[in-house]
Image (spheres, rainbow, N blue to C red):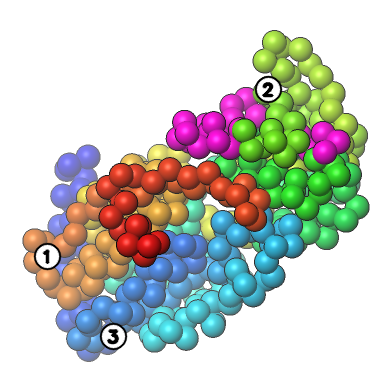
Amino acid sequence: VARRWKARRHRCRRRVVRGSLASEPPSILVLGGGLGGLNLAMRLSQMPWRTKPEVKLIDPKDRYVFLPLLIDYATGIVELDEFAPTFQDLLEEAPGVQHIQSLASEVDWRRRKVGLFEGDEGKLNFDAVVIASGSLGVQEAPILPGLSDAMADGKALCFRSLADAESLRERLKSLSSVAIIGAGYVGVELAAGLAEVLPEAAAAGQIALFGSRFLPGCEEANQRRSAEFVDKLGIVRKEGRVTSVDAEGLTWSSADGESRKHECDLVIATGALAPSDSKTCLTLQLTALQDSVEKGRAVIDEYLRVAPGVFCLGDASAGSPATGQIAMQQAEAAAWNIYAQLSGLPRVAWRRFKPSALGEFIALGSTEAAGVVEASQMGNLLPPAL
């Protein structure tokens, strides 16, 4: 691995500063307009450049979707413009950053080019590229028998995008029973949100939450608080594994191994069982960098690089928890390191990335939440609160 890295660094030594030394402005491509990608692009516009770079933010959507509020939109708590502004509006405050509504298909590291999906013209050159796409390569998602057919018949839907939230929002008035597959963060928050807007269904025990574990990986105090509140709302927690979905509901296997049937109006799949739409998912095949990708996440160095001039952050990067707060921290560090690279600053001026845990919060409807704050962050939080 060390030999491969040294070889990459040697071949790229002159090219990584090409934009800063040539008469033309540096070209920086940001692949993915999520929390990390958008904040990085905007931060780049604030750097003290001698020559302002051309920053292109490549994302197939026309809006930035703040995912923590996706459930609030689905349940009617917030409206579209309150949590999903257009990239055009957001980037008015970031001179030099252009949104390109497209998909990247390939990063050609040696030729310093990014290819776009078929239908888009040409390839884009770069002096630095940031991969903030969520995942790399084509991932084999687990297939739940019957889910695709149930979705086609309107008996099930997944929950991971703005389109999914819009579909659920349209159906709320006609629902009297719901089954949610997945008891992770999204599943629990979605169940609490639905119980708030469907109180009769919750009171009748008609909102069910299925999962082999409740909030896996969550702080123990948050697990306990969330479980108490979910139970208080009337949400029925089913510990076990869903084995299939059909027009009447789903079949699941309980902890004792018994197979059981659960009928409901609508099944909602969350987490890994919510299939992504290949037409809207940013897929990358890293030419000459395949050995740096493991299970859809890139192995990065301490400066957040897959290779010289190729940075990676958020869910697409390995080695740190895939959380919004980590993506924000990575965006800040990567923006500075790109500036340092293209400005020819010595390595001592670069920033080594070290994740800092701030705590975690789980929304339990529009007025309740469970939270744990790291003790080291209390000094930052208490003065503004007081």
Crowdedness near tag 2: few (<14), some (14–19) or many (≥20) residues, C-alpha within 10 Å? some
Q: Please indicate, yes or no, whether residue 282 appears anywhere in the rendered image.
A: yes
Separation (CA) of disc 3 from disc 1: 20 Å
Crowdedness near tag 3: few (<14), some (14–19) or many (≥20) residues, C-alpha within 10 Å? some
Q: Amino acid at mark 2?
A: Gly
Mark 2 or mark 1, earlier in chain: 2
Tell whether 15 sits left or right of 198: left
The magenta span reads 203-227
Q: Which residue is mark 1?
A: 349
Please provide percent x and percent y for residue 106: 46, 59
Question: Cβ–Cβ below 8 Å for labels 3 and 1?
Answer: no
Farthest residue toward the front? Answer: 386
Tell whether 337 sits left or right of 344: right
- The residue closer to the viewer here, 278 or 47, is 47
Q: Amino acid at mark 1?
A: Ala
Please give the name of the residue rendered at 54% of the width and 31% of the height, measured from the top-left corner.
224
Q: Which residue is mark 2?
A: 240
